[in-house]
Amino acid sequence: MSVTLRGGAADDFAALADFWVAAWAASGFDIDFAARRPWLIEHLGEHVTAAGEILVGCAADGALIGFVAIDRRSGYLDQLCVAPAAQGRGVARALVDEAKRLSAGRIDLHVNADNPRARRLYQRAGFVAAGDAVSAMSGLPTLHLVWTRA
Protein backbone atom coordinates (compact mmCIF):
# COMPACT_ATOMS: atom_id res chain seq x y z
CA MET A 1 0.00 0.00 0.00
CA SER A 2 1.26 3.43 -0.85
CA VAL A 3 1.47 5.69 2.17
CA THR A 4 2.41 9.35 2.36
CA LEU A 5 3.74 10.68 5.65
CA ARG A 6 3.20 14.20 6.95
CA GLY A 7 3.21 16.05 10.21
CA GLY A 8 0.08 15.71 12.29
CA ALA A 9 -2.03 18.65 13.42
CA ALA A 10 -4.68 19.21 16.06
CA ASP A 11 -7.33 19.01 13.32
CA ASP A 12 -6.29 15.37 12.80
CA PHE A 13 -6.67 14.23 16.40
CA ALA A 14 -10.38 13.29 16.28
CA ALA A 15 -9.88 11.08 13.21
CA LEU A 16 -6.75 9.53 14.73
CA ALA A 17 -8.67 8.80 17.91
CA ASP A 18 -11.47 7.17 15.92
CA PHE A 19 -9.23 4.56 14.34
CA TRP A 20 -7.16 4.23 17.53
CA VAL A 21 -10.34 3.13 19.32
CA ALA A 22 -11.26 0.77 16.46
CA ALA A 23 -7.79 -0.77 16.30
CA TRP A 24 -7.60 -1.35 20.03
CA ALA A 25 -11.17 -2.68 20.16
CA ALA A 26 -10.17 -5.26 17.53
CA SER A 27 -7.05 -6.23 19.50
CA GLY A 28 -8.94 -8.41 21.96
CA PHE A 29 -7.91 -6.54 25.09
CA ASP A 30 -10.76 -6.27 27.59
CA ILE A 31 -10.52 -2.49 27.94
CA ASP A 32 -13.11 0.17 27.06
CA PHE A 33 -11.02 2.10 24.56
CA ALA A 34 -13.99 4.21 23.48
CA ALA A 35 -14.01 5.63 27.02
CA ARG A 36 -10.33 6.51 26.57
CA ARG A 37 -10.90 8.43 23.32
CA PRO A 38 -11.02 11.88 25.05
CA TRP A 39 -7.83 11.00 26.92
CA LEU A 40 -6.04 10.23 23.64
CA ILE A 41 -7.06 13.51 22.01
CA GLU A 42 -5.86 15.44 25.07
CA HIS A 43 -2.70 13.33 25.27
CA LEU A 44 -1.79 14.01 21.63
CA GLY A 45 -2.20 17.74 22.24
CA GLU A 46 0.00 17.57 25.33
CA HIS A 47 2.57 15.57 23.37
CA VAL A 48 2.82 18.30 20.73
CA THR A 49 2.89 21.06 23.37
CA ALA A 50 5.83 19.30 25.02
CA ALA A 51 7.74 19.44 21.69
CA GLY A 52 6.82 15.90 20.68
CA GLU A 53 6.06 15.07 17.10
CA ILE A 54 3.10 13.33 15.53
CA LEU A 55 3.47 11.87 12.07
CA VAL A 56 0.42 10.68 10.19
CA GLY A 57 0.21 8.21 7.35
CA CYS A 58 -2.19 9.01 4.54
CA ALA A 59 -3.63 6.75 1.85
CA ALA A 60 -3.57 7.81 -1.81
CA ASP A 61 -7.00 9.44 -1.36
CA GLY A 62 -5.72 11.47 1.61
CA ALA A 63 -7.50 9.42 4.27
CA LEU A 64 -5.62 9.14 7.56
CA ILE A 65 -4.57 5.52 8.08
CA GLY A 66 -1.91 5.62 10.78
CA PHE A 67 0.10 7.72 13.16
CA VAL A 68 3.12 7.65 15.40
CA ALA A 69 3.86 9.98 18.32
CA ILE A 70 7.52 10.34 19.21
CA ASP A 71 9.60 12.66 21.33
CA ARG A 72 12.66 13.30 19.17
CA ARG A 73 14.70 14.53 22.13
CA SER A 74 14.17 11.61 24.47
CA GLY A 75 13.50 9.05 21.75
CA TYR A 76 10.35 7.81 23.46
CA LEU A 77 7.80 6.39 21.03
CA ASP A 78 4.54 7.08 22.82
CA GLN A 79 1.89 5.86 20.38
CA LEU A 80 1.77 3.88 17.14
CA CYS A 81 -1.52 2.97 15.53
CA VAL A 82 -2.76 1.88 12.12
CA ALA A 83 -6.41 1.89 11.08
CA PRO A 84 -7.76 -1.67 11.01
CA ALA A 85 -8.45 -1.60 7.26
CA ALA A 86 -4.82 -0.63 6.56
CA GLN A 87 -3.11 -3.09 8.89
CA GLY A 88 -0.65 -5.55 7.38
CA ARG A 89 0.12 -3.26 4.43
CA GLY A 90 3.39 -1.66 5.55
CA VAL A 91 1.94 1.47 7.15
CA ALA A 92 3.26 0.71 10.64
CA ARG A 93 6.69 -0.10 9.26
CA ALA A 94 6.78 3.18 7.30
CA LEU A 95 5.85 5.10 10.45
CA VAL A 96 8.45 3.29 12.57
CA ASP A 97 11.12 3.84 9.91
CA GLU A 98 10.37 7.56 9.83
CA ALA A 99 10.45 7.73 13.64
CA LYS A 100 13.86 6.03 13.53
CA ARG A 101 15.08 8.50 10.90
CA LEU A 102 13.94 11.45 13.02
CA SER A 103 15.34 10.11 16.27
CA ALA A 104 18.69 11.00 17.76
CA GLY A 105 19.75 7.38 17.35
CA ARG A 106 17.73 5.63 20.05
CA ILE A 107 14.05 4.86 20.51
CA ASP A 108 12.45 3.48 23.67
CA LEU A 109 8.88 2.23 23.87
CA HIS A 110 6.57 0.02 25.88
CA VAL A 111 4.39 -2.56 24.16
CA ASN A 112 1.69 -4.71 25.69
CA ALA A 113 3.29 -8.06 26.45
CA ASP A 114 0.17 -9.83 25.15
CA ASN A 115 0.22 -8.07 21.76
CA PRO A 116 2.15 -10.50 19.54
CA ARG A 117 1.47 -8.57 16.34
CA ALA A 118 3.07 -5.39 17.70
CA ARG A 119 5.92 -7.32 19.26
CA ARG A 120 6.72 -8.94 15.87
CA LEU A 121 6.63 -5.54 14.15
CA TYR A 122 9.12 -4.07 16.58
CA GLN A 123 11.35 -7.14 16.54
CA ARG A 124 11.51 -7.01 12.73
CA ALA A 125 12.35 -3.31 12.98
CA GLY A 126 15.39 -4.08 15.14
CA PHE A 127 14.03 -3.41 18.63
CA VAL A 128 15.32 -5.55 21.49
CA ALA A 129 13.88 -6.25 24.93
CA ALA A 130 15.26 -4.10 27.72
CA GLY A 131 12.96 -5.10 30.57
CA ASP A 132 9.45 -5.66 31.82
CA ALA A 133 6.98 -3.15 33.19
CA VAL A 134 3.29 -2.66 33.90
CA SER A 135 1.02 -0.15 32.16
CA ALA A 136 -0.04 2.58 34.57
CA MET A 137 -3.35 2.92 32.71
CA SER A 138 -4.40 -0.70 32.27
CA GLY A 139 -2.34 -2.58 34.83
CA LEU A 140 -1.35 -5.02 32.08
CA PRO A 141 2.23 -6.26 31.63
CA THR A 142 4.36 -4.47 29.07
CA LEU A 143 7.78 -4.94 27.57
CA HIS A 144 10.30 -2.14 27.39
CA LEU A 145 11.88 -2.26 23.92
CA VAL A 146 14.84 -0.31 22.59
CA TRP A 147 16.18 0.40 19.13
CA THR A 148 19.65 1.91 18.69
CA ARG A 149 21.10 3.12 15.41
CA ALA A 150 24.11 1.03 14.48
Image (spheres, helix red, strand yellow):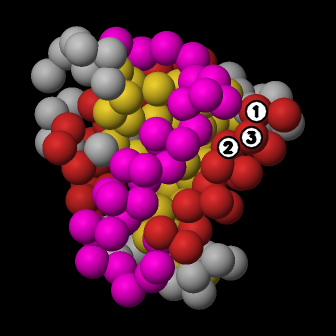
> Does the stretch in magenta take in 9?
yes
Res 113 → quadrant? bottom left
**C-alpha separation, residue under disc 2 versus residue under disc 3:** 4 Å
Check contact, mark 2 vs mark 1: CB within 8 A. yes
Vertical relation: 142 (above or below) 71? below
Q: Is residue 70 above or below residue 110?
A: above
Q: Residue, x 43% and y 50% (percent of image)?
A: 18
Q: Position of residue 53 (x, y in %)?
A: 67, 28
Rounded to the nearest angstrom, the CA distance separating label 3 from label 1 is 5 Å
In this orientation, which residue lies closer to the viewer: 30 or 122?
30
State yes or no: discs 2 and 3 in contact (Cβ < 8 Å).
yes
Q: Which secondary structure, mark 2?
A: helix
Q: Which residue is mark 2?
A: 44
Q: Which residue is mark 3?
A: 45
Magenta-colored span: 4-33
Q: Farthest residue in the right direction?
A: 50
| Position of residue 18 in the picture relative to residue 8 (left or right) | left
Q: Which mark is residue 48?
A: 1
Question: CB atoms at circles 3 and 1 under 8 Å apart?
Answer: yes
Coordinates of residue 130 in the picture (x, y in percent): 55, 61
The residue at the point 47 percent across, 69 percent down is 34
What is the chief secondary structure element of the magenta stretch? Answer: helix
